[in-house]
Amino acid sequence: MDIIIYTDFLNPQQTYDQIRNNMMQTGLIDSLKIIGRPITVSSLDIQIDSVAVQQLEISVEDLENKIEAIYTSKISPSDVMHQSINNNSGKKIPISAFSKIMIKPINYEPKIFIPLPEVYYHEDKKAVKIECYHKKKNRKKLLEFIQKTMPKYADEFSLLKIDFEIIQ
């Protein structure tokens, strides 16, 4: 059984993880695979101006530790701009003084994707296809579960309903 989803979710990573988890928890399917448009998520990208770092007398080791701490703590981009680091003389230098902080989209590739997610088209419309491998005699229950739960994944901030169809 396949589910074709045409909706672009506000937070696709969270939504598809939630769909996968909820479907697996039912016990109605053995496995599922998601194929389709590369789902993008936002990623923090910090570009350092090495000349400015040298002029501001910032320790490269301290800078590496600070940048690593930022990436691991998943601080929001607006909060990163307000972070600072002490230079060799103890003066606080804002990170924005020697770097560019950007958000760039990257492909989200959970283990359930085929190795290289490709754009999937169903009837000439860009979509995501969820292939459900259901257990024997659970087809009807799975169909009822999908019809009942899929509308709940509609974006809370959008007036649009989720656009999906089931192919049996």
Image: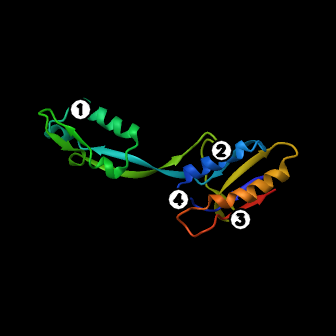
Q: Earlier in the sequence, mark 3 or mark 1?
A: 1
- Kindly identify the amino acid type of the residue bearing the numbered disc 2: Asn
Q: Nearer the viewer, mark 2 or mark 3?
A: 2
Residue 13, image x and y in percent? 55, 49
The percent coordinates of residue 64 (x first, y second) are 29, 33
Residue under label 3:
123
Q: Is residue 127 left or right of residue 133?
A: left
Which residue is found at the position 78% from the left and 58% from the top? 167
Q: Alpha-carbon neighbours of circle 1 within 10 Å: few (<14), some, or many (≥20)?
A: few
- The mark closer to the camera, 4 or 3, is 4
- Quadrant occupied by the C terminus: bottom right
| Pointer 1 residue | 60
Residue 62, picture quadrant:
top left
Q: CA distance from mark 1 to mark 2?
A: 42 Å
> Please, which residue is most extreme toward the left here?
89
> In terms of sequence position, does the residue under pointer 4 or pointer 1 come before the other?
4
